[in-house]
Structures are given as structure tokens and as C-alpha cells.
Image (cartoon, grey):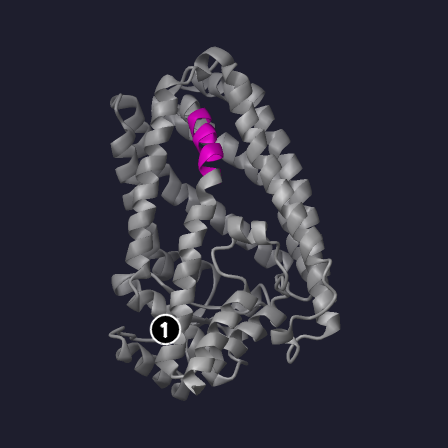
Amino acid sequence: MFIWIFIGLLLLKEIVDIYLDWRNVKHSTKFKDIPEEFRDVISQETLEKSQNYLKDTTKLGFYSEAVDILFTLLLIFIGYPTFERFVGSFTNSFILQGLLFFGIVGALSMIISLPFSIYSNFVIEGKYGFNTMTPKVFLMDMIKSILISVILGVPILSLLLFVIKNDPNFWWKFALVAIVFELFVSFIHPLLIAPLFNKFTPLEDEDLKEKIIDLGKKVGFDIKNVFVMDASKRTKKQNAYLTGFGKSRRVVLYDTILSYPQEEILAVFAHELGHYKKRHIPLMLLLSTVFYVVYIYITFIFYKLAPFSQYFNIQKEYTILIYAFLLSSSIFYFISPIVNALSRKMEYDADRFSADLLGKSNPLINALKRLEKENLGNLYPDPLYRTWYYSHPAPTERIYALLDLKKGEEA
């Protein structure tokens, strides 16, 4: 009975995921008229193009999902037990066994996903005019990602394996290590990791720079410099963001967004400042910490109580833990709508903050329209899909909320 529950939950997660994708495409592509709020910036041709883009990306997602399901089942019934025996015959060191085990699984996962990544970047993204990445850049990105995974992954994985082996009640130590590691990576990412993939140069537009710094001062956000990232090296899509914390904190603008009117760039940045001023970042960090602790504790319970060894012929702690993580991730998948609902509320709050800080909502409204147009966003997401997956409100919802603010401004 247990094995059917375990596999059933894994498959149910994948089936729901595929069903929601199918619903989203079916719902989104049945509309032929442009939403009234977007008629001043989006043409009929752009609407059709965005719908075709959604179809193509979702279709690729279906194939990827099918392969992923098959690959996961093969690993569960054949791969993990076989790899466990292989690494056990290679060395008696538990930590080295674990490193080899996860190295094999990681390498296979990368090989399986590689064709989909290549097709996505060079066929679909290229077809719709987004991809600017050369094969050389793609290859170098992959090599750098592997090296970073090894450099950061081997020490942290060795420590986790040591904890698992030496403490029968390891869950809280495991959670502590995972949380500290996430904070460490968040701190060093802007300083050491991101520059390996992109160039970050100080913003040359002194007028825009000063206005961004002044906005930060208004809310007590100390900005030493504003950086421009050469996003156009890989894509034509636009974005801007705040990253890091403490001494690693920085403001980053994609070079692709610099063509926007100054007011719109400031509105997007003010939205990010809203997350800072509303304390969304520490709140999300706290929630993330709680989530990690609960997630790892539930996984630990499955690790201790579920009969994985009996049904799958596995013995090593790290292998049993993988099965436990698979089971808990299938369950936690169904609470993702709750997490995203909270995130969407924060986005509304940040939008409102941007409008209040600038004294008007038009710049952010126009920026949202432009971003949706340039990125071929989905103008008609399925309500259930949106509820389940969207960490941000749909653009039309955000614009409606901002238009309500605008009415208040004009009243």
C-alpha cells in the first residue's frame, strides 16, 4: 500500500502541474481582443505573438515534464539503488560515497535537461526575438555553473552528510546548515557569483543615478552606486532589481531597460524600494526560515518512519533521505498557492508605495504595460493557474489597482 501512496503522490503533483499548464493555454488563447488597459501599447499582432509564445513554451514544458516524470521513476526504482551499490563498492568513506552519489545524479539530471535548455534558448527564445546568447556564452555559462556547484556544493554537502551520519536526530542541524548556507550565498552572490556571468558597470547617466539615490534617501535606503548589468548579452527582456544585503546590497538595472523613459525606470525602482520600506525582505526571510524548518522536519519524519528501505532495496542514509524529500516535496507542492497569495499581497503594497513615493501612479502603469509588451507576457492568465503559480498579480490586476489609486489622486 505504501508504495502506491508514494508513487501516487509523485504522479499527482506532476498531473496537477500539467493540467494547470493546459488550462492556462486553453484559457489564455481563447481571447482575441486586447484588454482595454493595454490598447494604447499592444497591437493585435503582439497579442497573437504573445499567445503563440505561451503555446510554444508550454508545449516544451509538457515534453520536459514527461521526460522528468520518466527519469524520476527510473531513478526511484532502478537508479538510486544501483548508484548506492556502485559508490559503496568504490569507497568505504560515507562522505565520499555521498559526494559521488549526488555527483552522478546531478550529472545525469543536467544531461537530461540540457536538450530542453538548448531548445528553449536557441529555438523558442530565438524565434520570438529574445535570445541574444551565442553557443559560446551558453557553454561557458554551463561550465561556470558546474564549477560553482562543485566549489560551493562539495563543502556544504560534506557537512550535511557528516551531520546525517553522526546525529540520529539530525533534522534541526540540517535545517540550521541549510539556512546559514542560503544566507551566505545571498550575501556573496552579488559580489562573487553574478559577476562571473555578467558585467556590472556603474550607471553613466548621472541625472538618473542621482534621482535613484535621492529616492533611496527619502526612505532611508543608502545607495552607494547603481549598476547596469549587460543583460543584452543573453536576452532582450527587461528588468531591474535590488539584491544582496548589508555590504553586498546593490541596485541593478538591465541595460535593456535603459531605453525606458526616466520616470518609468524610477517607478520600477520605487516599487523595489517599497519591498525594502515595507520590510517585505526580512518578512520573506523569516517565512522562508520557518518553511525550511517545517519542510526539513516533515522530511525527517518520513525518513524515520516510511519503509523506503523495505520497498526500494536501499540502505544508506543519504539515499533514504532523497526518497523522503521526494515525498515531502510532493505534499508541499499543494501549499504553494498560500505562499504565492502572500507574495502577491506584497507586490500590491509595493506598487502602492511606488505611486505614493512618486506622487503619481502613471509611470508605474506605463512601465507595467511596456514590460508586458516587450516580454510578451500573458495578458489573460487562467485564474486557477494564476492563483497557484503567480508570485506577482497579473499585470491587468496591478494596473486596475493603480488606476483606483489614480482616481484618488485626481479626486
Q: Is residue 300 above or below residue 43?
A: above
Q: Could you say which is closer to the camera, residue 194 or residue 393? A: 393
For mark 1, give the secondary structure: helix
Residue in the picture at 48% in, 49% down:
145
Can see residue 248?
A: yes
Name the residue located 67 percent from the left edge and 46 percent from the top edge. Answer: 22
Q: In this view, does 123 lie to the left or right of 265?
A: right
Q: What residue type is labelled 1?
A: Phe
- Compared across the picture, whether 183 is left or right of 407 comes to left
> Does 228 sit above or below residue 244?
below
Residue 326 among those drawn in magenta: yes
Stretch in magenta: 323-333
> Split into 4 quadrants, where in the image is the C terminus?
bottom left
x and y percentages locating residue 371 in the rendered image: 56, 71
- Identity of the residue drawn at 38% across and 84% down: 359
Residue at image mark 1 = 353
Q: In this view, does 220 lie to the left or right of 79?
A: left
Give the percent coordinates (x, y) of residue 187.
31, 56
* Percent position of residue 107, x then y: 53, 36
Judge whether 77 appears above or below 207 on screen.
above
